[in-house]
Image: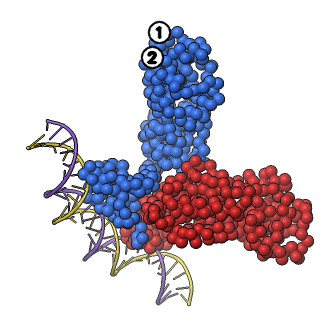
Chain colours: A red, B blue, C purple, D yellow
Amino acid sequence: MKKRIGWELYRSFLAVLQEGSLSAAARATGSTQPTLGRHIDELENHVGYSLFIRSQSGLIPTERAVSLEKFALEMSHLAQTFERIALSNEDGINGTVRLTTSDIVGVEVLPAALSDLQKDNPKIEIELVLSDMPQDLLNREADIAVRMFRPKQSQLIARRVGTCKLSFCASKQYIETHVAPTTVEELRQHPLIGYDKETDFIRRNTRDLGFDFDRNLFNYRADSNIVQLALIRAGLGIGICQLAIIERDSDLMPLLEDSIKLELDVWVTMHEDLRNSPAYKAVFDALVLNLDKVYPD
Amino acid sequence: MKKRIGWELYRSFLAVLQEGSLSAAARATGSTQPTLGRHIDELENHVGYSLFIRSQSGLIPTERAVSLEKFALEMSHLAQTFERIALSNEDGINGTVRLTTSDIVGVEVLPAALSDLQKDNPKIEIELVLSDMPQDLLNREADIAVRMFRPKQSQLIARRVGTCKLSFCASKQYIETHVAPTTVEELRQHPLIGYDKETDFIRRNTRDLGFDFDRNLFNYRADSNIVQLALIRAGLGIGICQLAIIERDSDLMPLLEDSIKLELDVWVTMHEDLRNSPAYKAVFDALVLNLDKVYPD
DNA sequence: TCGCTACTATACATAAACGTATAGGTATAT
DNA sequence: ATATACCTATACGTTTATGTATAGTAGCGA
């Protein structure tokens, strides 16, 4: 009531919450344990109740502390963005840009797509956040996102770069030791690799696919697409993968290529606040250019 | 590059930017002019360039400073939200809730709709922000919004509470001294009150209205709906107003009530982060309940 | 059981941040 | 012209915040 809470307290609060102890938070922030302790104390007697219970193994957040974390976290994202934008020079394209994509795109597609960019603008640093959450950009966890759906938020600049086709596939080794299926029905004779949890995204996109998908169909289940791909590559069975990835890997063979009509739009998205910063624009443009080749319409 | 920018600096930066001078910012933050000056200095030699040019009339922000303002501003909104949520008590519904609505709803409708709430929960404090921006909630400028369109952001909890019908109307005094129009065509004989700038919102909602709207049609133009209403009440002519408001004001008479088929959905919206805070929930529920009566389907 | 390594809490000296006071400058009004 | 009301910049003493050092406690592995 008396005075406003100092913003440094939010920062310390978040650090302790994330690191789990005053000492660890001190290491992470470059401060010291007593200082962090004092900050937490100050914050606590500001709000009037306990935010952490002290223990020998660290500070355990109370329920209310957890419920406040997201605000401090967003502040931290904004502070980072502020710093990065402030430090990105106007003449000469440089700075750190944070990308977020699905795991599979981050591992299989982006490195190649970004190599040109690195050549042209060696001073740009890229941070890659693998995640499927649609809200990373709004929370400022990332600056630019590559996503398989159209973003809904009006605060975002979005560009559609192409179509991502999916297909069944297996490793060459698997094909050589098994009889390749020629119809969808024959798939049931094979060990199948697929998802575990049915997400909204999967539900939406498998609805009008022609045949029913169900997690019980799969012999190997994994929610991570890179894990699925690793299983396919190991020759354990047949799975679904982006055609673009299959074609670039001589060890993978597409199967029943025309049987599955699953095409996803590929979008590159950026927060509109970053439009005027040349580094972000350069990365955005490079992604649009290169992903357009990877995912032709 | 060496150390992170202290979060207090962002706060001071924002204050100076908003207040226009070190001294004013000092007054606003409860700090002092030398301290603010030092903070700005520190921030500047952190980023490596000048953020303000010092003058006798205060500090004038450079272009880059302006481009950084939004991040500090959002941080400030989050800090405020943190504080308010932290201080809102769990047992006993209290705390400060910030509402945003259009000016006309804020002035004509909300006070009555909130009176019940105030009776039941005298400890809740309401701050009212009059604005038409759809993004106030995302920027954390407000906690709950009453809007005439469906919010697009998935991070928001939205509830449709009813339909807002619009109608032509005039003051009783005007009707008594003029011949009331009986057809749309006769409207042209009368002084009309309407908008000045054609916003997206107006364009969308007047498209399939039957007759062309154009700002040149209006003899009195104002973008603010409360101003339009004031002009109508003053008996200057015929304008458009919410039927709910017309019916509650015995001085206003609806005209050609069936000629204009313009119905807007009324939505109450809240950031999902606030769902668990009882004060916000109470206000949200009260708004849904009371606006449902004001705007029946 | 002993030693090692976590951790928090406290004490104390120091360095950093701060506020007060003041100088100096520039408008605007009297 | 002179007074007033702004503003920034600088100097200086003081408070405040911080880091170092240490004590005390719990857990873990040899």
Is residue A291 visible from the viewing direction of this image?
yes
Q: Where is residue A264 shown, x and y percent of the image?
A: 73, 56
Residue at horizontal 60 percent and vertical 44 percent from the top: B152
Label 1, on which residue? B177
Please report whichever mark, 2 or 1, sits nearer to the chain's N-terminal start. 1
Question: What secondary structure is found at the residue carrying circle 2?
Answer: loop
Disc 2 designates what residue? B235
Q: Is residue B175 above or below residue B264?
A: above
Chain identifier of the residue bearing label 2 in the image: B
Residue at 67% across, 65% down: A105
Type of the residue with mark 2: Gly
| Residue at x-position 33% and y-position 48% | B19
Q: Nearer the viewer, residue B166 or A160?
A: A160
Between A2 and B123, the one lying in front of the other is A2
Q: Is residue D4 left or right of residue A281?
A: left
Q: Are marks 2 and 1 in contact (CB under 8 Å)?
A: yes
Return the x and y of residue A89 as percentages of the image width and height: 45, 64
